Image (cartoon, rainbow, N blue to C red):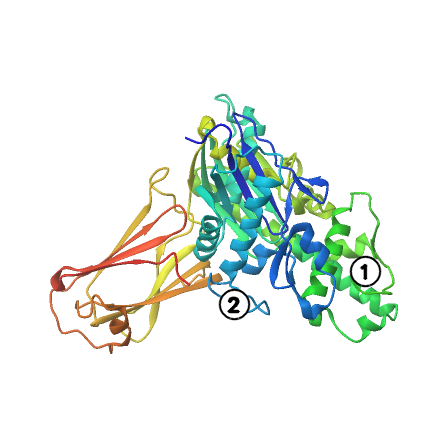
Amino acid sequence: MTDRSSPALGIDLGTTRTVVVAADRGSYPVASFDEGGSFCDHLPALAVHSQGRWWFGEAARARVVGDADDHWATPSVKRTVSTLAPEAALPGGPASTTAMGLLEAYLRWVADMVRTRSNLEIPEDAPLTAMVAVPANASTRQRYLTLEAFSRAGFSVTGMVGEPTAAAVEYAHREPVALSARSPKRYVVVYDLGGGTFDTAAVSLDGSRFSLLTSEGIERLGGADFDEEILELAFTGLVEQGFEFATTTTVEHLDASTRAAMLELCRDAKEGLRPGSRRLLLDFGSVLPDAPAVVLTTDTLYGRCRPHIDRTIAMVDRVLESLPQHGLDPSDPKQLGALYLVGGSVALPPVARALRERYGRKIKLSAQPHAATALGLAVAADPSARIRIREATTRHFGVWREALDGREKVFDPILSKDTLPPSEGEPLVVERRYRPMHTVGHLRFLECSRLADDGRPAGDLTPWRQLRVPYDGADDSDDHAAEHRPVERTTAEGDEIVETYTHTQDGTITVEIANAAAAFRRRYVLGAMR
C-alpha cells in the first residue's frame, strides 16, 4: 500500500506539456512547479541539447535561441519520439541519442521536478508511483516506449490507460449525477484535442466501471499543427515586408533550433487568443534580430485551421455511427452524458465554435481541459475511488499469410479493433490452427488503424518484427539458424501448427507457436519490438 506521505500520481505526458496530479486521501491537487521563481501547473515538453547535455522546461526555453551549430531542439519530446522505434536515432539529433534515451532523460527530469521543485510532499526515498496514459490509438510500439521509459526513469507504473478513458473518469468525478442509479446517461463521448494528437472515444458509464467501447484518432493532429499554420502565415508576412532572412530561406529549411524557438512564440501568441480576438501579433525579434512584427487576422488563421478541425469532427461522427453495435442509440440525447471537450487545444476559439455548430447543446467543456487526463489518472490510481477500467483494443493487429493457392498473401486480423477483453484485467487470447505448407514459417506482423473494404490494412500502419519459425522443430533453440534456413515445402503429414496470441492491457502481445507432431514449442514477445 502506498504510504500516505507519498501519494499516487496521475501523469499525463503531453505533446506540449506534462501535467502531474496527486491522489491524496480523496483529493486530487494539480502539482505546481517552481521554475525560476514562478509557479506553473505543468512542465513544458520542450527539449534542447546544448553544451553536451539535455535541457528541459524553462532552462531549455532559455537556450533555444542561439547559434544553431551548438544546439539541437525540439518543441515536443512526445511528438519527436512517437513515430520512432525505441532504439532509433533522433533525426538530425545528437549522436548516439535514441528515442528511448530522449524520453527517459525527459522523464528523469520530470521525476526530479516532482521531488524537488513541486508543491507535493514526497519523501526523498519514497517511490514515485504513477498511473500513466497514452493516446487511445497509440501503436503498441508507442505504448512499450512509454512504459519502458517511465520505468527506466525511476517511476513505478501501476497502470496505463488511454487518454480519453482517463478523461471520462475525470468527467464522472466532476459530474457524479451522471453515475447515479436514476440517471439515464449510459456513456460519454470524449473529444481530446491535445498538442499533437487527437482522440475521440465513447466510454460507457456504469457506476465506478468504465469501458472503452470504441475510439478513433488522428496520430499527428493537434495544437502543434495550429502552431505550424501560424508560422507559415507569419513567415509569409515577413516575406511581404521584405525581411531579408525570410526572403532567402523557407520555413522547411529553418534549422531545428530556430524553428523550435519560432514555434514557441507562435504557441504563446495562440494561447493568448480569446473568442473576441480579431488579430494576432507576432514578434520574432528575440529569434531573428531586426525582424519586423507580423500581424495576422484571426479570420485568416481560423480559415487555415478549419480543415484540421473538420477532420476531428469526421472522427467523432464515426464514433457516434458505431454506437448501435454496442446497444446505444446516438439519437437519444438522454443516453449521452456529454460530448466532453478536453486537451489544451480545445481552447482555440474556432474549435468549440465548430463543435457547437455540429452538435449543439451536447458540448461540455472540462473545467480544466489541459489537466483533465491527469486528473482522471489520479482518480483511477486512488484505491479509495475503486475505479474499474476495461478498454477495448484500439487498433487492428494481424499477420500476412500465404493464401491456399500459394500465389498471394492475405492479411489475417488476429485482433480486431474495438474488441473488449473478457473482464477487467484479463488478457485477450486468440488461437489459430492450420496445417503448415512449409518447413519454415515466415510471419510478417502488422498493426493498423483500420481495414479497407477488401480486408487489407489501411490508415496508420505500423510494421512489426518478422518471425521465421522452424515448424519442423529443427534449430528450435537458435533464432539465427532459423533466420537463414531456406523455406521448403513440407512433406510431413499430421503436423498441426497452433498459434496462441495473448494481448495484455498495456498493449504487449505474445505468441506461442507449437507443433505437437514435431515436439516444437516457442514463445515470442511481440510488443517489445524495435
Q: How would you rate the neighbour count of disc 2 (Cα within 10 Å): few for under 14, some for 14-19, many for 20 or more?
A: few
The reply to whether the C-beta atoms of the residues labelled 1 and 2 are less than 8 Å apart is: no
Pair 1/2: label in front: 2
Q: Is residue 181 above or below residue 224?
A: above
The residue depicted at 79 percent of the width and 76 percent of the height is 248
Q: Is residue 322 visible?
A: no
The residue depicted at 39 percent of the width and 45 percent of the height is 505
Q: Kindly give the residue lying farthest to the front in the view shown.
A: 124
Q: Nearer the viewer, residue 63 or 85?
A: 63
Position of residue 155 in the picture relative to residue 442 (left or right):
right
| Label annotation for residue 179 | none
Per the image, label 1 sits on a secondary structure element best described as loop
Question: Which quarter of the figure has residue 455?
Answer: bottom left
Q: Kindly give the residue lying farthest to the top in the view shown.
A: 182
Give how far apart the Cα atoms at labels 1 and 2 are. Answer: 32 Å
Position of residue 265 in the picture relative to residue 114 (left or right):
right
Position of residue 361 in the picture relative to residue 291 (left or right):
left
Per the image, label 2 sits on a secondary structure element best described as loop
Give the residue type that dot 2 points to.
Ser
| Label annotation for residue 96 | 2
Mark 1 = which residue? 284
Q: Nearer the viewer, residue 281 or 291?
A: 291
Residue 54 x/y as whole percent: 60, 58
Give the residue type that dot 1 points to.
Phe
Query: Which of the two labelled residues, at mark 1 and mark 2, occupies the earlier sequence position?
Result: 2
Q: Is residue 421 visible?
A: yes
Quarter of the figure with the C terminus: bottom left
Q: Nearer the viewer, residue 238 or 201?
A: 238
The residue depicted at 42 percent of the width and 47 percent of the height is 418
